[in-house]
């Protein structure tokens, strides 16, 4: 909490300092008067620096949400969490390990998309070959293509109708703010469907163990105590993590 507070205070100080510098002329000596004119009659050149810094800080604050909204992170973390619950040990692996694994898998899946964004948008912008608006437009294309490849047509149609916009002629005409929620809903459906398939073999083990204990008259012994070692053993013998991660990565259409 202390480091977070220090970071916020440092960000606020930097923002205030930049806003103050936006009221100074290019030579750093003249204060800006009402109307955007300095005492020497020269318009300042750093007037938008504070606004740009404010926008940058805002983007950095919503970066985790953007990671969830437009990448494979949602499906990945949900499937891994469902696997953990299906085995019957909700505390293992720990949340930090699970989030780290989901993040690394997200980087792996999204690497081709980010490579295209870097080649076609970021590097030309940094080299000064294209303006900022053109760079954003170029970066949006590969991300939209990835999201649309994972989005169900029914979900996309639902949000197109909810937006009350004119029906687009092609999928390329669908606004991005419509594509993103449709993509998220499709990811939730896919993740829960994969989770259901993963739950089935573990459920069978629980049923078999419960029936065996009931037949032996051991009704006071919780079935989960006996079934948990068998579920862990089965998961290890079939290389469960490898199968799940392989199926999870392969499920993304690129």
Image (spheres, rainbow, N blue to C red):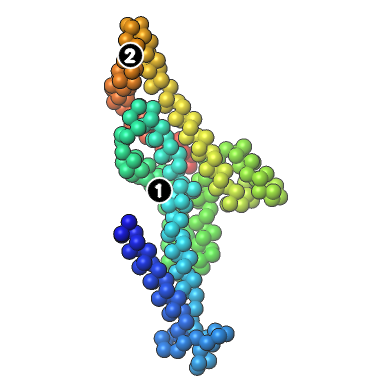
Residue under the image location 46 percent in, 30 percent down: 194
Which residue is denoted by mark 1 in the rendering? 111
**Mark 2 falls on what kind of element?**
loop
Q: Residue furthest bottom?
A: 40
State which quadrant residue 238 falls in.
top left
Most foreground residue, 66 or 130: 66
Q: Quadrant of residue 244?
A: top left
Q: CA distance from mark 2 to mark 1?
A: 52 Å
Please give the name of the residue rendered at 55% of the width and 48% of the height, measured from the top-left corner: 180
Q: Which mark is residue 220?
A: 2
For the N terminus, the image quarter is bottom left
The tag earlier along the polypeptide, 2 or 1, is 1
Q: Position of residue 133 (x, y in %)?
A: 54, 64
Depth order, front residue of 108/79: 79
Counting every numbered tag in the picture gives 2
Q: Secondary structure at mark 1?
A: helix
Q: Position of residue 145 (x, y in %)?
A: 53, 47
Left or right relative to 45: residue 81:
left
> Quick one: label 1, few (<14), some, or many (20+) residues within 10 Å?
few
Q: Is residue 172 visible?
A: no
| Residue in front for this viewpoint, 117 or 162 | 162
Q: Looking at the image, which residue is at 46% across and 47% down? A: 68
């Amino acid at each position: 909490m202390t480091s977070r507070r220090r970071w916020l205070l440092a960000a606020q100080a930097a923002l205030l300092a930049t806003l103050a510098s936006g009221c100074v002329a290019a030579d750093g000596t003249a204060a800006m008067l009402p109307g955007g004119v300095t005492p020497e009659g020269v318009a300042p050149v750093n007037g938008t620096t504070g606004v740009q810094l404010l926008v940058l800080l805002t983007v950095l604050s919503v970066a985790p949400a953007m990671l969830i909204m437009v990448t494979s992170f949602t499906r990945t973390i949900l499937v891994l969490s469902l696997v953990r619950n299906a085995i019957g040990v909700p505390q293992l692996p720990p949340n930090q390990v699970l989030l780290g694994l989901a993040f690394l898998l997200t980087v792996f899946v999204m690497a081709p998309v980010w490579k295209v964004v870097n080649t076609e948008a970021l590097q030309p912008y940094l080299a000064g070959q294209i303006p900022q608006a053109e760079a954003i437009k170029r970066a949006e294309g590969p991300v939209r293509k990835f999201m649309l490849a994972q989005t169900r047509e029914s979900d996309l149609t639902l949000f197109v109708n909810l937006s009350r916009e004119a029906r687009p002629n092609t999928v390329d005409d669908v606004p991005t703010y419509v594509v993103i929620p449709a993509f998220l809903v499709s990811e939730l459906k896919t993740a829960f469907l994969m989770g259901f398939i993963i739950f089935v073999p573990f459920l069978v083990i629980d049923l078999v163990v419960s029936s065996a204990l009931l037949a032996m008259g051991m009704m006071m012994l919780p079935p989960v105590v006996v079934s948990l070692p068998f579920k862990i053993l089965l998961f290890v013998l079939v290389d469960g993590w490898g199968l799940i991660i392989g199926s999870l990565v392969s499920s993304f259409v690129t």
